Amino acid sequence: MRIDMTGEAGDPGRPNEDYASAALPSSGQGGALVVLDGVTPPQDEAGCTHGVPWFTARLGGALLELATARRDLTLRACLSEAISRTAAGHVSTCDLSHRRTPQATVVAARWDEESVEHLVLSDSALLVEHPHGSVTPVLDSRLGELPPHISSLRSRVRALPEGSAERGAARAEYVSAVEALRNAPGGEGFYTAAADPAVASLAVTGTAPRAGVRALLALTDGAARWSQTFRLGDWSALLGLVRKEGSAALVARVREAERADPHGSAYPRGKTHDDASVVFAELGPAARAAGPPALRPLRSPRPTGS
């Protein structure tokens, strides 16, 4: 068993809003990992006196504890309880109904001698490496499947001159349109963990035989930029980089690519530098020989009703 993790703020002058951790129970029969990417609110729309780093630390810590100690609960149930606990910690002081109350993307995984469970909510990623080297990405695709008018607004922003007033106004319109779809009812938007425990039911989840999994790699989107934004290699190459050079090397490569394109001209992105967190768990050989890749293609669950 080998655990390798790195977390780095995108801006040295601001706290890292990610959370990354792993636990290996004393029984030696398994473990768990949790990675969260806090959603940065506008300065005048925080909705909470504590802030995003406080929220991700509370939510991530509760989720890791529950995933490790409560094997009788599914990861969805663990996330639901972790959200409830975190909300109870500041409901008396903060407006949890505020549309920008602290929230985060979530990746969680848990394993023992028999199986590996996973959960993904929003645009952080989990890579599952199989014994023969193939890699399956587990992704919540909803943020990339927003209604057509969102894509049109984004294209309009990118077509306008960098730094122009027109681009600034178009970007504000685009951000507002995307925000309207965050945790919106009806199934046309995307979902993050905030104050409503019911959102856990919408996470992408699955279970694979332990014999079919050699390693796990959890990434916030700031670290996944290596593949998703800068196109420096596919998911298999990304995991291979981390295995060979370590999680810190991945973040360093992302920072190099960001610095080479400071204005986002070649590789458009919302922030020049983003918080980046990585947890790599090499599980070691399984107790029995593994067969073919164990994960089936998954679709993100949609809410029912309106």
Image: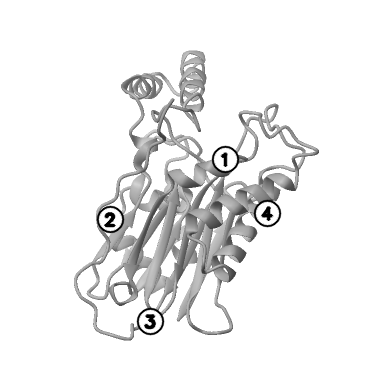
Q: Earlier in the sequence, mark 2 or mark 1?
A: 1
Please state which amino acid type lies under the numbered disc 3. Answer: Gly
- Of residues 272 and 196, which is closer to you in this image? 196
Residue that carries the numbered disc 3 in the rendered image: 284
Under circle 3, the secondary element is: loop
Residue that carries the numbered disc 2 in the rendered image: 234
Q: Residues within 10 Å of mark 1 (few under 14, many from 20)?
A: many
Under circle 2, the secondary element is: loop
Q: Earlier in the sequence, mark 1 or mark 4?
A: 1
Q: Are marks 2 and 1 in contact (CB under 8 Å)?
A: no
Nearer to us: label 2 or label 4: 4
Residue that carries the numbered disc 1 in the rendered image: 39
Q: Residues within 10 Å of mark 2 (few under 14, many from 20)?
A: few
Q: Measuring 40% from the left and 18% from the top, which residue is drawn there? A: 160
Please state which amino acid type lies under the numbered disc 2. Answer: Asp
Q: Are marks 3 and 2 in contact (CB under 8 Å)?
A: no
Distance of mark 3 from mark 4, alpha carbons? 30 Å
Please state which amino acid type lies under the numbered disc 4. Answer: Arg
Q: Measuring 51% from the left and 27% from the top, which residue is drawn there? A: 179
Residue that carries the numbered disc 4 in the rendered image: 58
Q: Is residue 228 left or right of residue 134?
A: right
Nearer to us: label 1 or label 4: 4
Q: Are marks 3 and 4 in contact (CB under 8 Å)?
A: no
Q: Earlier in the sequence, mark 2 or mark 4?
A: 4
Q: Residue 7: image x %, image y %?
A: 56, 59
Q: Residue 227: image x %, image y %?
A: 34, 51
Q: Is residue 246 above or below residue 125?
A: below
